[in-house]
Image: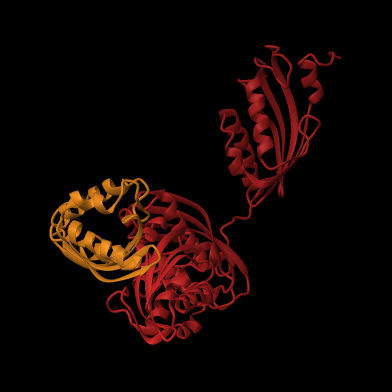
């Protein structure tokens, strides 16, 4: 065959096998016992070896592309100078995807007999590729924090996909799990990690993990994870309840040579068992006395200036039905802002509970505030007078938290004292 | 002789005189000041001077360095050499202390010839294989 015919075979090979990622047709271009002089020692030769090598490459870089820059031919040989690009979106030689792209040059020579190549020399600039992917160029355990974060994200995504290969790409073979004694019969190392996550998937087939937070310091990452799943298979011997549940977990993982080498794990086992109805909820039925004590404490803490206590005493879905000075509010934010604003205008402000009545889930308080108006309040210049005002608040509590409040204050008297309306 | 045969002979003389006989003063006969090597890092010195610096470093790191041509292809104004090279790491190499280890690897080089000089170069060699043999990188 002529050198031009051999070059034409190379062009078809590049398009139809390499760029199409179609290894089934490799045998049309390479003889069964073809020799690759660049194959690492111990790699199989021939079509079988080439399929293994190319398959690994195509698998790791699904968008790989080979562009011929130049071809030089003489007698039975063709040298191809090319540029290869790709994005590392799948594991490569056991290394988890970095999401990074590479563009490197490649020099190869093929020797042809009857339109098929029988020998191959040369290859890709693999060192350049590894460096562009950040897989090399410094000790692996000195990876940048964002790469450790990416590793954690890949681990979490692999759990959601029940992807064993993803776990194998993120956990070292001899991974030391400091908590796996919690589950009896679990293997050591990576195998144990795979078994533990697989068990979870058998209990919760729709299991989803999400990475809510990650903190990295040196080679250690702490992650906060939330999980959801429907209990459709046995879980620690508990028959399926069909209940959708959610739980939280935290893990600390240490990275060595680009993979997790050891880890500590805590997750809300009790919360899981409560949601499955196996053990009772810890929430105490709230008594009128307990409700009253909480409401008293809210005002005691307000007097001490501890406005953040509101976060503990009120439910996040708290609703306040107010008056003209305190309109309808949702959540605790406006409540806290209102108190802060008042405390700025009346720095010595104190509240007294003049009466308190509790029954069922409700606590009613009659309240009196006193304070000296030394700073402007709602745009009105400071009067520097001591002022006093009263209010009645009806609180409704659920599970020991204030969920709703109705509130009326003597707005008119406040406006009079500020000099905005004449005294009667 | 054809142009291709002339070009092959030029490259073979370069390998003999400059690399085998270590005559760095002969570099200018083969490589002009403005020659471009596409396979070196972006900030590397180019041309005859760049080659002189690179070879000096290489010969210091691998005093027994050998670079032998296995076979050559010539097409148009280009020559492709297929080389086998080897050396023992006895001096500092790119900041790496000598390991005393030996490597053997192969490479492919495309050279464009104009006016009897090598004006452009593309080069591939099994860098990872070399670093692994020197124990600088895990296998």
Residue A303 lies, in percent from the top left, at 59, 28
Quadrant where the C terminus of chain B sits is: bottom left
Count of numbered labels shown in the rendering = 0
User: Residue sitting at 45 percent across and 72 percent down?
Assistant: A165
* For residue A170, above or below residue A289: below
Specify whether A223 is left or right of A178: right
Along the line of sight, the residue nearer the viewer: A259 or A58:
A58
Q: List the single residue furthest toward the front.
A: B1
Q: Position of residue A37 (x, y in %)?
A: 31, 76
Asked whether B120 or A234 is in front, the reply is B120
Between residues A45 and A295, which one lies in front from this camera angle?
A45
Using the rendered view, name the quadrant where residue A277 is placed: bottom right
The quadrant in which residue A94 appears is bottom left
Q: Using the image, determine if residue A94 lies above or below residue A28.
A: above
Q: Quadrant of the N terminus of chain B?
A: bottom left
State left or right for residue A93 relative to residue A22: left
On the rendered structure, is A179 left or right of A235? Answer: left
Q: Is residue A348 above or below residue A306?
A: above
**Residue A43 on image: x %, y %:** 32, 79
Residue reaching furthest top? A384
The chain coloured red in the image: A
Colour treatment of the image? by chain
Residue A250 appears in the figure:
no
Q: Position of residue B53 (x, y in %)?
A: 23, 48
Chain B palette colour: orange
Q: Residue at x 73, y 22 (%)?
A: A378
For this rendering, which residue is in front, A139 or B120?
A: B120
Residue A52 can be seen in this image:
yes
Q: Quadrant of residue A139?
A: bottom left
């Amino acid at each position: 065959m002529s050198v031009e015919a051999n070059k034409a075979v190379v062009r078809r090979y590049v398009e139809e096998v390499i760029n199409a990622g179609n290894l089934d047709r490799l045998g049309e271009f390479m003889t069964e016992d073809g020799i690759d002089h660049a194959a690492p020692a111990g790699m199989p030769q021939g079509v079988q070896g080439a399929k293994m090598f190319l398959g690994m490459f195509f698998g790791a870089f699904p968008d790989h592309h080979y562009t011929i820059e130049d071809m030089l031919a003489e007698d039975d040989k063709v040298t191809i100078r090319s540029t290869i690009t790709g994005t590392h979106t799948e594991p490569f030689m056991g290394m988890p995807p970095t999401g990074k792209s590479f563009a490197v040059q490649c020099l190869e020579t093929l020797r042809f007999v009857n339109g098929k190549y029988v020998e191959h020399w040369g290859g890709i600039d693999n060192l350049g590729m590894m460096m562009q992917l950040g897989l090399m160029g410094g000790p692996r355990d000195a990876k940048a924090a964002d790469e450790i974060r990416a590793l954690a994200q890949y681990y979490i995504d692999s759990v959601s996909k029940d992807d064993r290969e993803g776990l194998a790409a993120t956990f070292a073979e001899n991974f030391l799990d400091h908590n796996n004694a919690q589950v009896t019969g679990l293997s050591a190392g990576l195998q144990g990690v795979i078994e533990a996550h697989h068990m979870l998937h058998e209990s919760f087939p729709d299991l989803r993990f999400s990475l809510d937070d990650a903190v990295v310091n040196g080679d250690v990452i702490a992650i906060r994870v939330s999980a959801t799943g429907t209990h459709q298979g046995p879980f620690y011997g508990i028959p399926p309840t069909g209940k959708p549940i959610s739980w939280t977990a935290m893990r600390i993982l240490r990275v060595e040579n680009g993979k997790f080498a050891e880890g500590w794990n805590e997750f809300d086992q009790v919360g899981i068992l409560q949601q499955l109805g196996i053990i009772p909820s810890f929430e105490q039925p709230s008594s009128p006395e307990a409700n009253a004590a909480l409401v008293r404490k809210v005002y005691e803490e307000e007097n001490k200036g501890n406005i953040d206590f509101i976060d503990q005493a009120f439910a996040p879905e708290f609703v306040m039905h107010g008056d003209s000075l305190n309109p309808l509010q949702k959540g605790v934010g406006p409540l806290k802002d209102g108190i802060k604003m008042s405390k700025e205008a009346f720095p010595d402000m104190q509240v007294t509970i003049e009466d308190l009545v509790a029954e069922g889930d409700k606590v009613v308080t009659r309240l009196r505030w006193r304070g000296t108006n030394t700073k402007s309040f709602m745009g009105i210049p400071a009067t520097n007078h001591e002022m006093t005002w009263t209010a009645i608040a009806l609180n409704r509590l659920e599970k020991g938290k204030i969920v709703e409040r109705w509130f009326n204050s003597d707005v008119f008297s406040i406006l009079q004292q500020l000099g905005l309306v004449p005294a009667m | 002789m054809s142009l291709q045969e002339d070009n092959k002979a030029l490259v073979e003389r370069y390998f003999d005189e400059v690399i085998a006989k270590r005559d760095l003063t002969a570099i200018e006969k083969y490589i002009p000041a403005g020659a471009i090597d596409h396979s070196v890092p972006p900030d590397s010195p180019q041309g005859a001077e760049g080659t002189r610096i690179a070879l000096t470093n290489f010969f210091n790191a691998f005093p027994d360095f050998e670079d032998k041509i296995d076979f050559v292809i010539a097409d148009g104004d280009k020559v492709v050499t297929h080389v086998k090279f080897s050396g023992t790491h006895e001096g500092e190499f790119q900041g790496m202390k000598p390991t005393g280890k030996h490597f053997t690897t192969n490479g492919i080089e495309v050279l464009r010839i104009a006016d009897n000089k090598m004006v452009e170069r593309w080069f591939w060699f099994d860098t990872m294989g070399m670093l692994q043999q020197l124990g600088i990188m895990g296998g």
